[in-house]
Amino acid sequence: MVSAIPQERLAEIVREARSQSGVPAVAAGLLVGERVELAADGPVEVETPFRIASISKWFTASLAALTLDLEAPLGAGASAGRFLSHTADLLPGSPKLLPEPCRGLWSYSNAGYWLVGEAIDAAAHVSFSDAMQERLLEPLGLERTTFEDPPGAALGHIQDGETGHRPAGSVEYPVARRPSGGLWSTVGDLLRFATHQFGGPGPLSDTQLRAVHEPRAQALGGSYCLGCWSRELAGRRLCLDHEGSVAGYQSLLLLVPEEKTALAVLTNSWRGSGLIRRVVHELGLVPASPERPDDGQVEPGRYALGDSAAVVAERGGRWRVAESETDPLTRSRIERPEYAVDSIGGGVYGFAGGLLMSHRLDFPRQGIARVGWTALPAVDS
């Protein structure tokens, strides 16, 4: 169990992680029982808003549970539950179907959330943004969580060379994309949201919360629910979590329901996942060790779909992966330095022990690699 730690210790962990990673700024919050600890480092305060990117999906799934019949077919043929669990065979950034070899597999798709947002528009008789404000954010008292650009927000940074940063600049988040990642928030607001996900006061009933947290699909050594992952931490503790990355921000919200523990970490850098990984490790929120030996098979080669590409190769006796993708808002190309992965059991491979779900890959079908949560078909070099 994560014990309640003094605020100065959380601040020390955050400060050291920022020093090691070079991230411009970070805010973090830790909830253990009823005790909240907050810390920030860099030119931000603990109440500074950051883009939370795909953590917004957890909010959208919660709003959908309040508003829609999750199992009823929507206009595109699949149910809201399938769109929200990334099992509707959609391309990552388009409401079109995946290529045939990738269908029937779990594959991350923002487009499914856009379709659910449209359905909420229709069911709530107000815009998706207004429904989010009126039915979820206001009842929870999340006064600093919003789709509109807030004053005093942290400035996002994108990579500049192998280790540097440069400001991402002002970007406009399209209204149609808001359900998949458009929210700004603070670590304090995210911990208040977590308290409701634990069953604390708020608009969702226990039945609706269970629907959000129910595993829908197996992938990468965990289960995807609606807007969040479910996986096992060391000590056989159930964890719910989701990461976010867009326009020069990376973030994490992680909950351990049986302990009423929650961690929120917000950074303003594309390289923020390294800092987040260090904080998670220092707090002991690490994945469980595999119970069975690896039964997977790495398939080296080049994989690509749309703007995402990955090369898997063996060098120096270890499997290594190089990734690239295009940020959907800044349109900047993200070229991640090659990294080594090791087996973490069950056919899943991970960078840095697979501490974060985005640091995992697997090969669910011949000629298919799931890298960065997306099923990518093998292509000719």
Image (cartoon, rainbow, N blue to C red):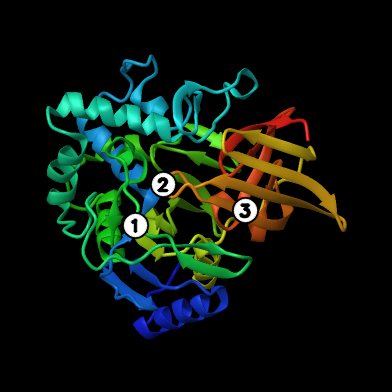
Q: Which badge, 3 or 1, is on the more N-terminal residue? A: 1
In the image as oriented, which residue stretches furthest toward the right?
317
Q: Quarter of the image containing the C terminus?
A: top right
Residue type, mark 3 in image: Glu
The residue positioned 33% from the left and 34% from the top of the image is 211
Query: Mark 1 falls on what kind of element?
Result: loop
Residue 299 spot, x, y in % from top left: 79, 37
Q: Is residue 198 above or below residue 379?
A: below
Q: CA distance from mark 2 to mark 3?
A: 16 Å
Marks 3 & 1, CB-CB < 8 Å contact = no
Q: Is residue 200 above or below residue 91?
A: below
Judging depth in this view, the residue of 370 and 348 nearest the camera is 370
Q: Quadrant of residue 38?
A: bottom left
Judging depth in this view, the residue of 355 and 213 nearest the camera is 355
Q: Quadrant of residue 365?
A: top right
Query: Mark 3 falls on what kind of element?
Result: strand
Q: Which residue is mark 1?
A: 170
Residue type, mark 2 in image: Leu
Q: Is residue 7 above or below residue 273?
A: below
The residue positioned 58% from the left and 21% from the top of the image is 103
The residue positioned 26% from the left and 33% from the top of the image is 65
Instruction: Kindly report which numbered mark, 3 or 1, lies closer to the viewer in this rendering.
Output: 1
Residue 60 spot, x, y in % from top left: 30, 39
Q: Which residue is mark 3?
A: 335
Crowding near pointer 1: few (<14 within 10 Å), some, many (20+)?
few
Q: CA distance from mark 3 to mark 1?
A: 21 Å
Residue 209 in view here: no
Q: Which residue is mark 2?
A: 329
Q: Which badge, 2 or 3, is on the more N-terminal residue? A: 2
